[in-house]
Image (cartoon, helix red, strand yellow):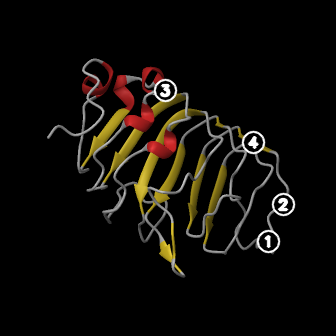
Amino acid sequence: KKEGVHFDTPPDLEEVSGNFELYSNIKEFHFPKLKTVGGSAMMSINNYDDETFPLLESVGGDMTFQTGYVSWNNFYGPDKILYPSLRIVGGVLDIRPRTPDPWSSDPSELNNTLTNLDFLSEVESIGGFRIENHEALVSYEGLKKAISTCPSSKWAVENNGYNPTYEQLTKEQQWTKPE
């Protein structure tokens, strides 16, 4: 991360060996060839489309991204697959609502539109999971492929529409909020 560096178009990166941090509101900021981030990834972009990270398959460390932006009549959320090729997150997959400070460790805003995690249905392996302050979230079915790889000690969900324990998902198969 370099302070004050701006790109008219991002470089054609295929791999980042270290950490990757991106905070942008630039329309159509694309990384069409990026497949691997070796370290941690923190992404806060308010203009996602299908070409933003189409090939990103793996992040070696933690991966943090935000949900719920509304900008220029462009909304991304439960109906958008933000990382369609993502399969592996070596560290904690941390999903946060939009906040004034994208790197805040304590999200201060709520996302009241995300109802499910179906956009994660192709993810096969995670080293942990954290989601909070998503008050409409009632389904974790999108984590079915990856849940067995997540250590129970790194499962953190709170202040959502449904806050299942790790055991409720793995042992009881209670993927959606009970009626």
The residue wearing badge 2 is: 11
The residue wearing badge 4 is: 35
Mark 1–mark 2 CB contact (< 8 Å): yes
Q: Secondary structure at mark 4?
A: loop
- Of residues 5 and 63, which is closer to you in this image? 63
Residue 102 in the image: x percent, y percent?
48, 63
Direction bottom: furthest residue = 72
Marks 3 and 1, the one that precedes in the sequence: 1
Tell me the distance, in whole angstroms, between the alpha carbons under discs 3 and 1: 36 Å
How many numbered callouts?
A: 4
Tell me the distance, in whole angstroms, between the alpha carbons under discs 3 and 4: 20 Å
Q: Quadrant of the C terminus?
A: top left
Residue 15 in the image: x percent, y percent?
79, 43
The residue wearing badge 3 is: 145
- Of residues 104 and 33, which is closer to you in this image? 33
Marks 2 and 4, the one that precedes in the sequence: 2
Q: Amino acid at mark 1?
A: Phe
Tell me the distance, in whole angstroms, between the alpha carbons under discs 1 and 4: 20 Å
- Of residues 151 and 116, which is closer to you in this image? 116
Q: Which numbered disc covers residue 7?
A: 1
Residue 9 in the image: x percent, y percent?
81, 69
Q: Amino acid at mark 2?
A: Pro
